[in-house]
Image (cartoon, rainbow, N blue to C red):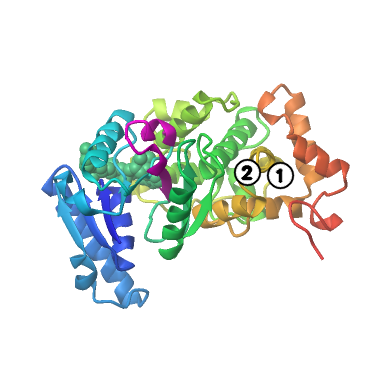
Amino acid sequence: MKFAVVGSGTMGHGIAEVLAIYGHQVKLIDISWDILNRAKQRMEESIRKFYEKGTVKEDPSVILSRIEMSTSYDVAKDIDFAIEAVPEILDLKRKVFQSLDEIAPKEAILATNTSSIPISEIAEFTSRKDKVIGMHFFNPPQIMKLVEVIPSKYTSEDTANKTVELARSLGKVPVKLRIEVPGFIGNRIFLRLMQEACREVESGEASIEEVDSCARNKIGLPMGIFELSDYVGLDIDVDLWENIVKRGTSDVPCKLFKEKVARKELGVKSGKGFYEYPGNKYLKVKLPATSKVDPARLLSLAVNEAAWLVENNIVKPSEVDDVMKYGYNFPKGLLEIADELGIDNILRNLEDIYNKGYSAYKPQDLLVKMVKEGKVGKKSGEGFYKYA
Ligand code: NAD
């Protein structure tokens, strides 16, 4: 297949590389040759590493020869599929989609890698709303297996199916939402983890290190919640938080993250966030071995969010779990962990925090029903999953 990837930055160069590794012809478009040459260098280095490791068998120069770079959209005139990865600015995405819509063949699918802009809004800039879709890769796209596939209210089933098939053919784990919701799946759940971590610290229940020690040492996550937030970038976290809440998701009043951003402490990239990173380099944070934080409390809001997604038929429990495993390196799915911790324990924590005046913690009907029916997780033989 012939592809255009628009934007050759952090995500774009990685997506182009993946497509070329899997044998596709790629036109990589950006606004200047300086930027494109830098992207070429990054792709060369990365493909060489895969080749040396043996995960890529083909000669790197042959793979690279499938990527044609350009500063003009004209190269998109014979493509089958475009993936846009320009900065998260609606007006910029509008210009890109109008250009692609004008130049690309009428049957070509136009996908966006946006993290937070509603796909429907982007589709409305084109004359082929049924062929516009969200295809949300995770960073770095050469390595992370998750791709969220997000149909808008206009996207045809054919477009959605072809996008899922494409992701699968690239060795990815596609998770298709029934219909788009703000933040899709991963970012909605990540927001809930940040909110509860923030609430616990701001209300004096625990320290930042205790929260993160619980996440890493008791739950087995690769990073603490604050540590992961630092890694992602606190400005990006706050943007994500505000974007999802602005579009109607309940908020949890908590200022810790916003105060950090106001002080320009942005995490790893600025050398300091919740922790310090000399030389602006990520180094695994040192944490206490024990923590008084209850895992069922720390995950409660995230599990409630997952229950909302399941209840509204946006995705299935196993798909929530795929998102957290393949997009966030969870060792197990969020709902598998919830089943182990006990849905009754999750519910008790939600009710407790809700009764303290935090309306976002109102337990989802699904969780209440599960507990009423005795489906409290592994210990009862059934929770989100069935156990022998
Ligand atoms: P980036 O800033 O690293 O790269 C964007 C690239 O787009 C730059 O090279 C820029 O020169 C180019 N560009 C700007 N205007 C353009 C135009 N008119 N035509 C062609 N190219 C243009 O950004 P990024 O981090 O790669 O993010 C791109 C998109 O992917 C955003 O929508 C972002 O939300 C999303 N995303 C990012 C991540 C991440 O971790 N960085 C993860 C998932 C999704």
Which numbered dot is residue 210? 2
* Above or below 377: residue 196: above
Q: Nearer the viewer, residue 254 or 103?
A: 103
Residue identified by numbered label 1: 292
The part of the chain drawn in magenta is 117-137
Rendered location of residue 376, percent (x, y): 82, 49
Q: Is residue 103 left or right of residue 232?
A: left
Q: Residues within 10 Å of mark 1 (few under 14, many from 20)?
A: few
Q: To which quarter of the image does residue 21 belong?
A: bottom left
Q: Is residue 172 left or right of residue 278?
A: right
Q: To which quarter of the image does residue 248 belong?
A: top right
Q: Nearer the viewer, residue 297 or 119?
A: 119
Q: Residues within 10 Å of mark 2 (few under 14, many from 20)?
A: many
Label 2 to label 1, Cα distance in Å?
A: 7 Å
| Residue type at numbered disc 2 | Glu
Which numbered dot is residue 73? none
Helix, strand or loop at mark 1 = loop
Rendered location of residue 294, percent (x, y): 72, 44
